[in-house]
Amino acid sequence: MESFGITDQCPGNLQALDANLFMTLLNALMLSKCKLNVKEAYPENSAPELSDGDEFDFIVIGSGSGGAAVANKLSDNKNSTVLVLEAGDYPSATSDIPGLVFSTQRTYEDWQYHTQPSNTSCLGNKGRMCRWPRGKVLGGSSSINAMLYIKGNNRDYDHWAELGNDGWDWEGVKDYFKEIENLDPSIQSENFGRDGLLDLTKYDSGEPIKYALHEAYRELGYPILSEENPEKPLGILDTYNTIKNGIRVNAAKAFLGKIRHRTNLVLSINSFVQKILVDADTKTAYGVEAKIGERVLHLKAKKEVILSGGTINSPQLLMLSGIGPKDHLESLGIQLVKNLPVGRHLEDHILVEITAKVNPDAALYPHPLDNIYNYFIHNTGILSTVHLINTLTFINTKNDSRYPNVGFHHVLYPQNDIYMISTIGRIYEVDDRIIADRLEAIKTNALFSLAVTLLNPKSKGRVLLNSTDPHDPPIIHSGYLTIEDDIETMVEGVRFAEAIYKTDPMRKFDPKLLKLTLPACDGYQYDSDEYWKCVIRHQAATVYHLSGTCRMGPVDDGTAVVDSRLRVHGVRNLRVVDASVFPKIPSANTQAAAMMVGRKAAAMIAEDWGLNSGKTHDEL
């Protein structure tokens, strides 16, 4: 028997009932994939029904963490029509499987951005560039990220308020987090919501080295961290995850799919917005120009245009629409609508892996076929998680504050498991020699990385237009490590990582640092500060936490694009609602903060337009 590329190597050795049992197993495996990539988990695509000149109360550009959250709450008022325009398509089945978290990068679900060649960072990558994945798909980057949900600490948001953004301190935002959250009922917590739409779970990876890590950090003075107390943010923890029943819960699935019955919510996918329409005389946004399939439509917003394209796309679209730095726009022949510092203040967390060869028993590694069976039949196992990546640590290398300046991600590569190493090498375009070093080492060892993460970068990057063509990727200057303080702090993080490897709990795995092939660093004494600075400049990479390019702040501070109600300064009926408005990057992963911004923005918009007085869907 041969079909679909499967050959029966033992024909005739199962008969009657035995054969039926075997075919039942095969049928169960085939049916199990039907739970992935379920279009019914999202609103229906209404792109074919749109016509030039159609009007909606609100047009939301982008369906990511901010856009999906704001659209959800605005459509709660049954008298408000909300159009969501998404440049990408429905998420793939691959994106639904947590264990394949890196596999969607460099595919059609990714904008596939890269930074400009740098002299200070990404030196070990091909072309001295860093790859910056961004989600070009329904759900935005929440459909391709690592599904970690962590809010940051109270100081992060108190600092936002100190910068002139009233209402954005911890007391002003904490309830908006809770409103979006639906914490697994088996988890006891008072500080996480249970009535929201975003499913949150937590798991224990079970890896032997994880429990050693807990003891190692405790030996160095860092306890197991409780997210119940944001005022004590130092320590190690397993984060909450946007995963349910082993399947990713992206923002569109949570905030749009669960209200797909609402007739006043309209979704249009494969809809690329080319320009925000702004009346030059009155400085009022009144709609968008979007390419939908082969048609170019002009769609009108009776109340507001809400830009939620993300930290790269949002500034790009503003500048294409005449809102941005005067000199830059005029150099491209773009008519200026409003002179604002759009695209500046770009911030990101970066990390560098300090990798050690460890004993193979540091990792649990079931047979790959067991992993596949457990996932597709039971929704369990390694593929239902992001493995040890859900374990994070926050420390202060200077011992000058109870708040962190460095974090650690933890990455475990089981012996002979080449998937992660090869995939990361492909998506980051790491030098082939580095990949070869890792692949050779993993033949006889497991590999474990303490990934030093810079939480409070002082270096800033910038986004610029490459041309007036909206389909032309923008110019991205990462700005990584242009301020010396940043690399000094990362070296301090490296020293802490070395101390972790030397603790008694970690010694039982016999860790030995893996020295990578970096000819440019051979001129420095191994393990000197200058050596590690060289390694960091060659190997540091994005943690996917881009923010700040449409910064929130008072109009007179010279760096702000939007005010504290996320309205674009000097332009009526236009707001930005995504991570680009962060006035300072939080000292944690940014997905939760972006969703909170979307929920808080919706409350402000509803208040400004008097929508809270109308009937909601829940009241009907």
Image (tube, rainbow, N blue to C red):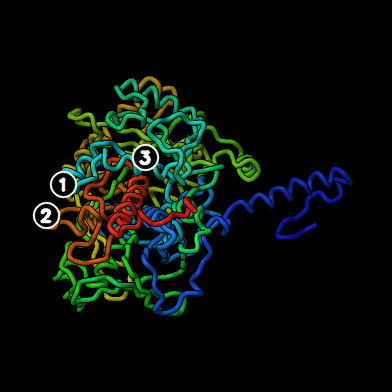
Q: Quadrant of residue 343?
A: bottom left
**Residue 427 versus residue 15 in the image, above or below:** below
- Judging depth in this view, the residue of 366 and 430 nearest the camera is 366
Q: Are marks 1 and 2 in contact (CB under 8 Å)?
A: yes
Q: In x, y percent, where is residue 439? A: 46, 44
Pointer 2 residue: 557
Mark 2 crowdedness (10 Å alpha carbons): few <14, some 14-19, many ≥20: few
Q: Earlier in the sequence, mark 1 or mark 3?
A: 3
Query: How many numbered marks does the figure carry?
Result: 3
Pointer 3 residue: 150
Q: Is residue 478 visible?
A: no
Q: Which secondary structure lies at badge 1?
A: loop
Residue positioned 35% across, 75% down in the render: 289
Of the two numbered discs 1 and 3 in the rendering, the one whose residue sits closer to the viewer: 1
User: Looking at the picture, which amino acid does disc 2 mark?
Assistant: Asp
Q: Which secondary structure lies at badge 2?
A: helix
- Say left or right for 366 vs 423: right
Name the disc covering residue 5, or none: none
Q: In x, y percent, where is residue 177? A: 36, 42
Q: Earlier in the sequence, mark 3 or mark 2?
A: 3
- Judging depth in this view, the residue of 445 and 477 nearest the camera is 477
